[in-house]
């Protein structure tokens, strides 16, 4: 019922509007969800990490292309076998429901991030989401200070945040110059001031977020 498959970065796992014969579960790596717009532009509308699933259960084709952002390992379950098992297993049904709810939460977060007008504000929100949702998955380590190995390229970040790669680069340097982060390399940064990052993102509720507090405690 299940087979494991390894993909290299840059590969396409599923095409937009393709009706998959399997349900995919991410074992390692990061995948991106890409949507082609009517004017010919592409936009990254989501990222998938370890534990996330893709494929339409009891439904039609996928609405986004699924591409590999970093080398990845994916477990593919026969769609028919998965659906049959889902009708018999309360535990599996609950797991799928929780996965869908997590996707909805992530979508709401991205809407809040993209509502910011300035690229630095959007980037601040993106860094906070990395820390909250992807600790130990996307290269976030609880050190002193908190360190992030950026899991996607500047080009991917630009498409994800609705801007250009050069704007992302300027935003990183602006945060570095303000002392909010330390930019060691383009893909290696340190969070120096969480409160300033939260204020800049406009996500005030994160001042009391348990995941952020746990990272702070780990860093201490």
Image (spheres, grey):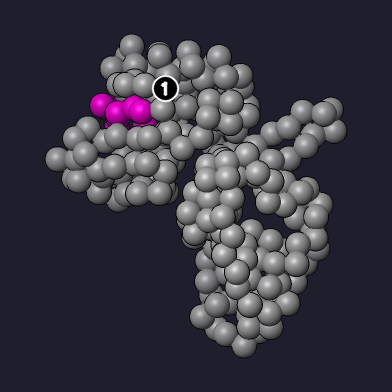
Residue at position x 40%, y 49% from top? 137
Pointer 1 residue: 186
The front one of 118 and 90 is 90
Rendered location of residue 85, percent (x, y): 63, 83
Magenta residues span: 188-198
Which residue occupies the extreme left position in the image? 220
Rendered location of residue 46, percent (x, y): 60, 43
User: From the image, which quarter does the C terminus lie in?
Assistant: top left
Which residue occupies the extreme bottom position in the image? 88
Q: Quadrant of residue 158?
A: top right
Residue at position x 30%, y 29% from top? 191
Left or right placement of residue 54 versus residue 179 in this view: right
Q: Is residue 62 above or below residue 4?
A: above
Rendered location of residue 149, percent (x, y): 38, 35
Residue at position x 66%, y 66% from top? 23
Residue at position x 53%, y 56% from top? 73
Left or right placement of residue 97 versus residue 219 in this view: right
Q: Is residue 63 visible?
A: yes
Number of other residues with Cα within 10 Å of mark 1, as a class: few under 14, some 14 to 19, many 20 or more: few
User: From the image, which quarter does the N terminus lie in?
Assistant: bottom right
Tell me if residue 122 is in the magenta stretch.
no
Q: Is residue 37 above or below residue 179?
A: below
Q: Quadrant of residue 175?
A: top left
Q: Quadrant of residue 104?
A: bottom right
Assign a secondary structure to mark 1: loop
């Amino acid at each position: 019922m299940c087979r494991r498959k390894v993909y290299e970065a840059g590969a396409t796992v599923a095409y937009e509007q393709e009706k998959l014969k399997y349900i995919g579960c991410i074992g390692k790596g990061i995948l991106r969800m890409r949507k082609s717009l009517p004017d010919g532009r592409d936009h990254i509308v989501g990222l998938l990490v370890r534990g996330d699933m893709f494929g339409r259960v009891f439904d039609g084709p996928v609405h986004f292309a699924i591409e590999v952002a970093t080398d990845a390992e994916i477990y593919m379950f026969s769609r028919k076998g998965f659906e049959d098992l889902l009708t018999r297993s309360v535990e599996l049904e609950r797991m799928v429901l929780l996965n869908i709810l997590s996707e909805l939460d992530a979508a709401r977060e991205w809407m809040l991030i993209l509502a910011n007008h300035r690229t630095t504000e959007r980037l601040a929100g993106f860094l906070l989401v990395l820390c909250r949702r992807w600790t130990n998955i996307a290269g976030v380590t609880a050190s002193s200070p908190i360190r992030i190995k950026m899991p996607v390229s500047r080009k991917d970040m630009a498409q994800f945040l609705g801007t250009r790669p050069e704007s992302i680069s300027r935003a990183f340097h602006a945060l570095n110059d303000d002392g909010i982060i330390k930019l060691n390399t383009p893909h290696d940064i340190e969070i120096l001031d969480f409160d300033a990052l939260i204020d800049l993102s406009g996500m005030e509720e994160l001042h009391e977020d348990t995941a952020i507090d746990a990272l702070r405690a780990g860093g201490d």
